[in-house]
Image (cartoon, rainbow, N blue to C red):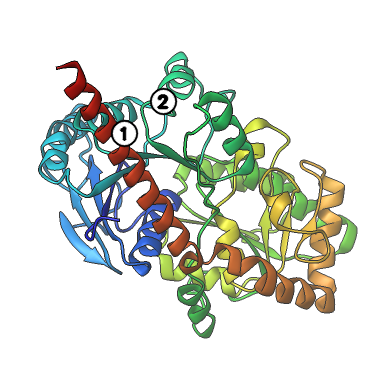
Amino acid sequence: MPHSLQVHCVCGGFGFPVGTASTKRVMLMGRALHSAGVAFRVWHLGPSSHSENTRRNGVEDGVSWEYLSPKVRRPANRWVRAFYFVYGCIFLPFRLARLRRDICVYVYYQGNMIDLWALFICRLLNIPVAQECCEWWPGTPDETRFIRWMYQNIMFRWSTGALPISKLIEERIKKLARSDYPVLRVPVLVDADEVSRERNHPPTTPGADQPYLFWCGMVDGYIRDPVFLIQILGEVGRRYALRPCLVLAGPCSDAVREELLSVAEAAGLEQGQVIATGFIPEVELFRLATHAVGALLPLWDDDRSATRFPTKLGLYAAACRPVVASPIGEISHYLRDRETVLFAPAGDESAWADAVATLMKDADLCAQLVDRMQSEVLPLIEYRSVGPILKEWFVGLYQKSSNSRRVLKQRNSVVC
């Protein structure tokens, strides 16, 4: 291992160090490596959509970052926003060329033009590069010909190795890549300490002073989940005469909030029974999670759910709350029904209503679920536990790339 190996993350579009699930994954990957003695730096292309991000560069929890766009704040004009990304892409090669010795690049972009650009630059500069793969876009409604081409022909051929988040994604990568292509599956990550300490502080969200169920995520991007959960609440009320609130924490536009309230009214819910917080500070997110009656994690019988490992599971586990989920994808490899979780089939309103009612009425079972989640699942996804494994993998990636360059030089010398 080079004595000063560094990992440089190329990402952007979601903000840093404040943001949503993507920001958190990058941060915890960096903190995991930092805890194992490997320096981690973030190059953020483009501006931030979160007003809390104001500094162009800084260091937090051992992770350093810098914006390569002209300004941090996201401009309203879409052409100016596009220029900010182009500006960052132009400067990226110069930054990497200056620091090319003893580094690996970790590309968080997946299947888009910036992913292609970053992989091309690293290939040109002979820098070993790890491809993040926490989503699998081919086969989903968001698929394009370009995305499919990137996944099938570029992402796992131009990169030196890949970091899939789930077993199914790992299997698909191995079918597309060469036989000796390095792959390391990294699950959802969480800092249990920063979540659990908020149990001593009640949430300040209006309406959260009464019993509530909790869901977090991109409400605008996953509206199917909140709509389903609202309908479940209506079923629970009709069949079990239980009236908990539902707190939906995450970015939510006014138009979507109005749509959810209309769904709640149609489901027979009372006014104020559904609370859509919109984007909230991370501390408030942790407080809402730790003070909820239970946490909800619906998934669907489709390819996107099958390949996913939702980040919210880490938060739910660290919050010490009982969980109702669907046994889809990576969730089914980590959790066991009525041992660490209450499982209900995807999209089955009746089964979900039964599971939610059990969560609210059976305190002894819920305590057992929480205890076993803490002892069996949380240690597997606590970020410090993956630090040494990540370090070893990146060192191997660097050495593999160095050996390949050495062999190439020897061949060129023989030819000459």
Tell me what residue is drawn at x 48 percent, y 77 percent: 193
Q: What residue type is labelled 2?
A: Arg
Would you place residue 246 above or below residue 10 in this image? below
Q: Name the residue under label 1.
A: 404
Tell me what residue is drawn at x 73 percent, y 72 percent: 372
Locate residue 19 relative to residue 334 in the image: left or right. left
Would you place residue 233 above or below residue 175 in this image? below
The mark that comes first in sequence, 1 or 2, is 2
Label 1 secondary element: helix
Marks 1 and 2 in Cβ contact (< 8 Å): no
Q: Which of 93 and 19 is in front in this view?
A: 93
Label 2 secondary element: loop
Q: Which of 275 and 182 is in front in this view?
A: 182
List x then y, in percent, for residue 310: 58, 50
Viewer-nearest of discs 1 and 2: 1
Q: Name the residue under label 2.
A: 157
